[in-house]
Amino acid sequence: MPELAAWDSFYEIVGSTAGALIGLQFVVMTLIAERPLLATAEAAAAFGTPTIVHFGAALLLSALLRAPWTMIIPVAVLWGLIGLSGAAYTVIVARRMRVQNAYPPVFEDWLLHVLLPLVAYAVLVLSALAARVHTSGVLFVVGAATLLLLFIGIHNAWDSIVFHVFVIRRGTQAEPDSDETAGNNK
């Protein structure tokens, strides 16, 4: 299908980036696992695991859209299912954020862990419904949703690392001054 062939380089870059960031996230989590704290499992389920899910979704979408499809409908059904699954998972993440007590979520957390992922996954579902009629335009929308998931994952991974380095480690190594705390990062 010539419409998809034009996207090969885009999805090669996005997929490679998502795959590399998944590996890097595993390395970082292994390094910070040396200092486990109470309630970190709840916080990891609310804040850490979704990052890997979004990177995985970007990687899966990139792989699907690089396959040599002859028709748009089968791939649209698959990206629509990814969208439905991701939206359902985002609802679970919202519940986990509310019940965990390791960190009180702020607006930025709700935006980047719930609202924007929900938008990205909903866009995948809606674009799957319009794929047959507006193939060329829909491919741009799917590309934007995939890129949004990648950037959400990058932000959330960075935010988690900053929280662990500047809040958690500072708290375990020395007495933090109230003026020097990192603030809202997890």
Image (cartoon, helix red, strand yellow):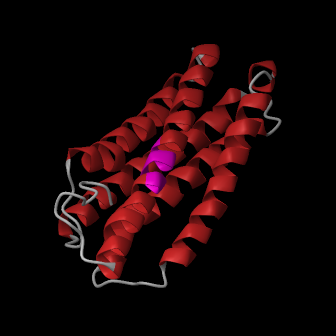
Where does the image place residue 173, in percent across and percent down from the top left? 35, 80
Prevailing SS of the magenta stretch: helix
Relative side of 59 to 104, left or right: right
Does residue 166 lie above or below 65 as drawn? below
Foreground pick, 58 / 68: 58
Foreground pick, 43 / 33: 33
Relative side of 79 to 181, left or right: right
Residue at 61 percent across and 70 percent down: it is 27
> Is 155 part of what is drawn in magenta?
yes
Residue at 50 percent across and 27 percent down: it is 127
Magenta residues, start to end: 152-158
> Is 11 part of what is drawn in magenta?
no
Foreground pick, 138 / 13: 13
Foreground pick, 139 / 175: 175
Does residue 78 lie above or below 136 as drawn? below
Which quarter of the figure is the C terminus placed in? bottom left
